[in-house]
Image (tube, rainbow, N blue to C red):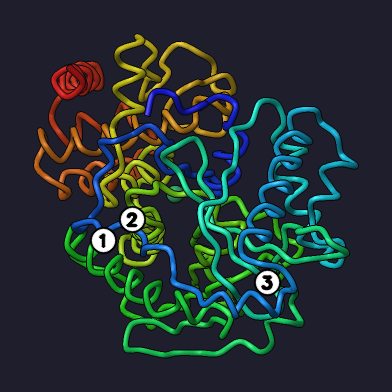
């Protein structure tokens, strides 16, 4: 875990793990190197073993399996080297020339926003897909995995995905709780994603005691081309409804490039389930709890991390390095406040720490002040007085300073 090149991957992490809320605050799920991450339900066994593919299946590609693996590995080596040398021409040459939206997205994520040293990507095994695509299971920095698609273009294997036209018409599946919209291309993973969404709803209900009662819209996107002008920054995210659009959760299928990577030992299911619990907590916070307390970013993202069993490792790293971001910055002027109430004013590399610290404040409240009910009690006071320092004495009968001291002691106990 310690060998993971965390800093060099920061842009990649920010790109693949952020989430969006109504407030526009980005949410980042725990970063790699966090073995203490807890799934809301027991983890699913590791990803399925490599598929057994008859050699004759590869004949339709005009190459043997070994040749395809070598061709894809050559492309990946070029991809990594192009990022390291900021060579745009060489980078573009590794991407499907006929899927411009996808090409633009990959370039933005890995070259424009990324750059610098990049871990090697190693092909482990292949799965034949329709439309002339091959799905490659890739290992990244030993412990992590991704599943990308490739296509043979003029003798070269390029990174690809189905275009919007190739995906065809969406299909809908409606249950008592959800209205799923997806595509046949993702049928390999659709049932499992739907099951994870049902589990996520149950996990939120278990901790918070209620969830939105209406049928909830969930869109599964098997490729970037479904919404080609968005800048996806999450594997799944909640979008609050408007007068014309219902609330919904958008999910990138695990075999799309936008999904990013996952822990090989966990399989993609654990990361996706955790993210769905996080996002459905946002939905529940807004719809079933009237967005109470949302004036403070830590109350929104901390709650979502708490309910989804998010890791405290970022909080503990900050505590051990004596770099704890205060709950309330009581010293700076309003516009310069650097605290957990205002994630948008933090440095980019502090934001993931803020999620973990927010999680720790919610966990501290639940542990020391009376469970999740205490969180809602504080949230109600925050809504009344719009000021956390004034709300805490009203909710808990102690000063903000005493609350802050209690939280830091709680961190100390948890982080030793
Ligand atoms: Zn969030």
Q: Earlier in the sequence, mark 3 or mark 1?
A: 1
| Mark 3 or 1: the one toward you | 3
Disc 1 element: loop
Can you say which quadrant of the picture contains the C terminus? Answer: top left
Name the quadrant containing residue 382: top left
Residue matched to label 2: 270
Name the quadrant containing residue 122: top right
Q: Mark 2 Cα within 10 Å, few/some/many (few <14, many 20+)?
A: many
- Using the image as rendered, state which of residue 3 and residue 350 is in the foreground: 3
Q: Which numbered dot is residue 129?
A: none
Looking at the image, residue 377 lies above or below residue 128: above
Q: Is mark 3 within 8 Å of ligand 1?
A: no
Q: Mark 1 Cα within 10 Å, few/some/many (few <14, many 20+)?
A: few
Q: Earlier in the sequence, mark 1 or mark 2?
A: 1
Do we see residue 319 in this rendering?
yes
Residue matched to label 1: 44
Disc 2 element: helix
Task: Tell me where residue 176 appears, x and y as whole percent.
Answer: 32, 88
- Using the image as rendered, state which of residue 158 and residue 42 is in the foreground: 158
Please indicate whether residue 177 sits to the left or right of residue 235 in the image: left
Looking at the image, residue 222 lies above or below residue 173: above
Task: Tell me where residue 151 appears, x and y as whole percent.
Answer: 74, 66
Residue matched to label 3: 133
């Amino acid at each position: 875990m310690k060998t993971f090149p965390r800093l060099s991957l920061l842009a990649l992490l920010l790109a693949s793990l952020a989430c969006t809320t109504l407030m526009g605050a980005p949410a980042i799920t725990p970063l790699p190197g966090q073995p203490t991450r807890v799934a809301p339900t027991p983890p699913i066994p590791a990803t399925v073993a490599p598929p057994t593919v008859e050699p004759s299946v590869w004949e339709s590609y005009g190459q043997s399996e070994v040749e395809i693996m070598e061709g894809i590995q050559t492309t990946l080596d070029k991809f990594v080297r192009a990022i390291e040398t900021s060579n745009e021409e060489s980078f573009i040459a590794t991407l499907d020339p006929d899927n411009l939206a996808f090409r633009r997205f990959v370039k933005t994520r890995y070259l424009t926003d990324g750059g610098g040293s990049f871990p090697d990507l190693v092909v482990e095994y292949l799965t034949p897909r329709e439309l002339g695509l091959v799905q490659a299971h890739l290992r990244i920095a030993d412990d992590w995995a991704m599943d990308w698609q490739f296509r043979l273009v003029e003798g070269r294997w390029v990174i690809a995905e189905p275009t919007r036209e190739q995906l065809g018409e969406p299909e809908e599946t409606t249950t008592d709780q959800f209205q799923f919209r997806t595509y046949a291309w993702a049928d390999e993973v659709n049932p499992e994603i739907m099951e994870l969404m049902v589990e996520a709803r149950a996990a939120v209900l278990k901790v918070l005691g209620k969830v939105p009662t209406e049928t909830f819209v969930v869109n599964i996107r098997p490729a970037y081309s479904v919404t080609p002008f968005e800048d996806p920054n999450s594997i799944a995210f909640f979008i609050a409804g408007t007068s014309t659009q219902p609330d919904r959760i958008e999910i990138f299928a695990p075999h799309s490039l936008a999904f990013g990577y996952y822990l090989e030992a966990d399989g993609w299911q654990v990361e996706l389930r955790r993210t769905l619990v996080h996002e459905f907590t946002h939905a529940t916070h807004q719809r079933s709890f009237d967005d109470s307390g949302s004036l403070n970013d830590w109350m929104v993202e901390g709650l979502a991390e708490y309910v989804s069993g998010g890791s405290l490792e970022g909080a503990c790293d900050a505590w051990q390095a004596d770099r704890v971001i205060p709950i309330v910055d009581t010293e700076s002027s309003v516009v310069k406040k650097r605290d957990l109430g205002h994630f948008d004013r933090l440095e980019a590399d502090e934001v993931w720490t803020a999620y973990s610290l927010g999680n720790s404040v919610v966990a501290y409240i639940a542990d020391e002040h009376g469970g999740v009910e205490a969180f809602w009690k504080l949230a109600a006071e925050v809504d009344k007085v719009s000021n956390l320092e004034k709300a805490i004495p009203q909710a808990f009968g102690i000063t903000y300073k005493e609350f802050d001291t209690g939280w830091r002691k709680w961190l100390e106990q948890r982080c030793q």
